[in-house]
Every structure is written in C-alpha cells, then in structure tokens.
Amino acid sequence: MRRLLLALLPAVLLATILVGPALAVSDPAEMLKNPRQEARAEAIGSQLRCLVCQNESIEDSGADLARDLRHVVRVHVAAGDSNRQIMDWMVVRYGDFIRLRPRLTWVTLLLWASAPLALVAGLVAAWLGMRRRALPPAPLEAAERIRIAELLR
C-alpha cells in the first residue's frame, strides 16, 4: 500500500501543478475597494468568456488577456456603467463569442433546434427507407407467367 502511494505521488503533484492555473484568483490589487462594486464586477466577469482559454470565464482564467478584460470591467463598474452597458461594450469589441451564455436569437435558436431536427429527419428517412423495402413485388402479368412456365419445362 505504501509503495502504491509513493508511486502515485508524482502523478498527484503533476496534477496539482496543472490544475493550479485553472484556479486563478484575482490579484487583490485588481479588486475594487467597494465590495458591492467588486461583487458586481465579478458577476459580470463570470459571464464573459476568456478569449484565450475559451471555456473559462475571465474571472476564472489566468491568461493575461483575461486579466486585462477584468481590469476593463472594473474600470467600467467604477465609472458607474450599468451591467448591460458593460456587456454591450464587450460584445461590440469582441463579438457575441465573448458571452458565455449567448443571447437567444434566431441563429442560436436554430443552433439549439438543429440536433432534434436532424434526429427527426433521420427517423423520417429511416422510416421511408424501411417502408420502401417492405413493399411486395408487383404480381406477374399473364405473358410473364407463360414465359416462365415455358422456361421451366
């Protein structure tokens, strides 16, 4: 048992080192002095995608660009901008991709509906294919039956 634990120790240390950047915490120097404004900035930052990491919010990312974006959010919050104004500012500069939760538009609705629509289309195509195979062959005409009877003699 002790050998197993010693063998796993390097893997645990490596995993700890690799996970470390994912637990990036804001530098206290970055934080706003007003706790309410800081909480608001963190809430806004948690809705913005890190453009480097792409699946993390700028609040969770340790990338330099995320740190810069956190600073921009805090500048806007300190200036008194509303949450919507800050989100709109970010979307204008970086596009809808900056949002971790995209707005519901026709494009996003089509994207969400595409998987069920593809499933329904596949089921309809499979049903039509099975239905076509299930049709019995057409009965022979009288001339065909006579010809077969002649061939079988």
Image: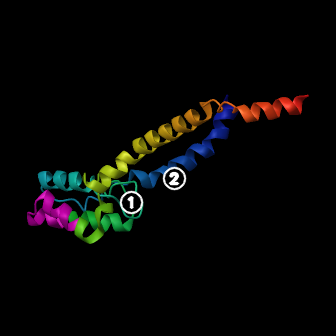
Label pair 2/1, CB-CB below 8 angstroms:
no
Q: Residue furthest right?
A: 153
Q: Is residue 131 left or right of residue 90?
A: right
Give me the residue at 13% from left, 63% from top: 85
Quarter of image, res 116: top left
Image coordinates of residue 37 in percent, x first then y, are 13, 55
Q: Position of residue 123 (x, y in %)?
A: 49, 37
Among the 4 quarters of the image, the one containing residue 68 = bottom left
In the orientation shown, which residue stands out farthest toward the left? Answer: 80
Q: Which residue is mark 2?
A: 18
Task: Identify the residue at horizontal 57%, vertical 50% (top origin).
Answer: 14
The x and y percentages for residue 126 are: 54, 37
Colour scheme of the picture = rainbow
**Total tally of numbered discs in the picture:** 2
Tell me which numbered mark, 2 or 1, is placed earlier along the sequence: 2
Q: Secondary structure at mark 2?
A: helix
Residue nearest the observer in this picture, 137 or 121: 137
Q: Amino acid at mark 2?
A: Leu
How far separated are the C-alphas under marks 2 and 1? 12 Å
Instruction: Assign the C terminus to one quadrant of the image.
Output: top right
Residue highlighted by disc 1: 62
Residue 71 visible in this rendered orientation of the protein? yes
In the foreground, 75 or 131: 131
Foreground pick, 141 / 113: 141
How far across and down, in percent of the image, does residue 22 sit? 42, 52
Q: Amino acid at mark 1?
A: Gly
Is 112 contained in the magenta span?
Answer: no
Is residue 72 visible from the viewing direction of this image? Answer: no
For the N terminus, the image quarter is top right
**Residue depicted at x 21% and y 51%:** 43
Magenta residues?
74-90
